[in-house]
Structure formats: structure tokens, C-alpha cells
Image (cartoon, rainbow, N blue to C red):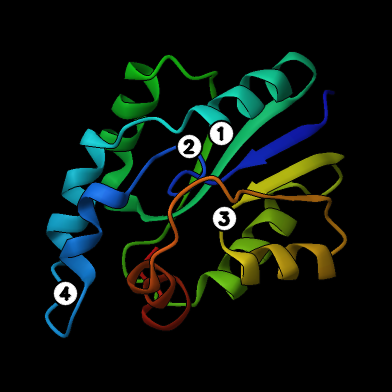
């Protein structure tokens, strides 16, 4: 069994900058934010790492996107020509902060497996993965957004 390489989507492979405006300010339009994900440009830095990892590892996509976005997410991954892999998404009504949700899911999914690397852009999530014993690569190539960080850590939306 090949080791796992775990990749987040938003901010690692998908450039979300064009849709962050939907979650800025007091009135957040989460439906529009996630509906626009199908139009995300690919982040070439993340793509290069993913393709390199896919040579020796089984790919696992672990995202905070809600389950209702599965079809669009699978379509986007295929349209970008990204390597196949299992896709784990947030249950639709789960509002746990990403810092709790993602490491918990990875522990369950990877039980008994070797995890070569986890790539994520959320620094708090990266710290939590490391506390759980995983090797982490922090994705720093995308533009940071206070609104998106709020969504990940406070609103439990991505």
C-alpha cells in the first residue's frame, strides 16, 4: 500500500481570491462563495507539489468545503486534470472549526496508513496536524484573506 499525500483544496490547489468578496463583511453569502468554486483558477505551486507526490503516493483530498459541493469539486478536479484521489468533505451542517475537523477526519481516514505529507494553507490547521504527528507542508503561495481565515476558524464553513 502506497503512503498517503493529503492535499487541501482552497488556497492550496484552488485560487479562491475571486470569490472571497462573498464572505467579507457582515452579510456573508456562503451559497455564492461555494457556487463560484467551479471557476477557481489552479494554483501552479500546489499543482506541481501534487503531481510530484502522486508519483509515489496515493492522493487524498481533504477539504473544508461542504458535501453539497461534491459534484462541482469533482468536476473541477477533473477539468484541471489533477491526479485521482479520495475526496473527503465537511458534512453539510458541520460547523466545527477546521482546526478540529480536519485532523480528526485525517486520523480516521488514515488509520493504519503511512501519511507522507499533509499540505494545507491554514496555519492553525497545520499546527494541529503536527500536534497529531503528521508531517506538514504549509502552503504559503496563495494570497491570505482575513475573511477566509474567519470562515475557517470561527464560522466553521471551509
Do the residues bearing badges 1 and 2 touch, measured as CB atoms within 8 Å? yes
Q: Residue 94 at what x, y percent from top left?
A: 40, 72
Which residue is depicted at the point 33% across and 36% down? 73
Residue beneath label 3, please? 121
Label 2: state its secondary structure. Answer: loop
Depth check: give the residue in front, 133 or 104: 133
Q: Residue at x 20, y 57 (%)?
A: 33
Q: Position of residue 12 (x, y in %)?
A: 52, 43
Number of other residues with Cα within 10 Å of mark 2, as a class: few under 14, some 14 to 19, many 20 or more? many
Distance between the Cα atoms at labels 3 and 1?
Answer: 10 Å
Measure how far apart labels 3 and 2 are at the Cα level.
10 Å
Name the residue that disc number 4 marks. 28
Identify the residue at horizontal 56%, vertical 31% (top origin). 45
Circles 3, 1 touching at the beta carbon (< 8 Å): no
Q: Residues within 10 Å of mark 3 (few under 14, many from 20)?
A: many
Q: CA distance from mark 1 to mark 4?
A: 27 Å
Could you say which disc has been placed on residue 13 in the image?
2
For residue 78, side relative to residue 114 (left or right): left
Quickly name the residue at label 1. Answer: 46
Of pointers 3 and 2, the one earlier in the residue sequence:
2
Label tally: 4
Mark 1 neighbour density, 10 Å: few (under 14) some (14–19) many (20 or more): many
Q: CA distance from mark 1 to mark 2?
A: 5 Å
Amino acid at each position: 500500500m502506497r503512503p498517503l499525500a493529503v492535499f487541501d483544496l482552497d488556497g492550496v490547489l484552488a485560487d479562491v481570491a475571486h470569490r472571497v468578496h462573498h464572505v467579507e463583511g457582515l452579510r456573508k453569502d456562503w451559497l455564492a462563495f461555494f457556487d463560484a468554486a467551479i471557476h477557481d483558477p489552479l494554483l501552479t505551486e500546489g499543482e506541481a507539489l501534487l503531481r510530484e507526490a502522486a508519483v509515489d503516493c496515493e492522493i487524498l483530498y481533504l477539504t473544508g468545503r461542504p458535501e453539497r459541493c461534491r459534484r462541482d469539486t469533482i468536476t473541477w478536479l477533473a477539468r484541471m486534470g489533477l491526479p485521482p484521489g479520495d475526496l473527503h468533505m465537511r458534512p453539510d451542517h458541520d460547523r466545527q472549526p477546521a482546526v478540529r475537523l480536519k485532523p480528526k477526519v485525517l486520523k480516521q481516514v488514515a488509520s493504519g496508513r503511512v501519511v507522507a505529507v499533509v499540505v494545507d494553507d491554514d496555519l492553525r490547521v497545520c499546527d494541529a496536524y503536527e500536534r497529531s504527528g503528521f508531517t506538514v507542508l504549509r502552503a504559503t503561495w496563495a494570497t491570505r484573506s482575513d475573511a477566509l481565515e474567519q470562515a475557517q476558524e470561527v464560522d466553521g464553513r471551509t
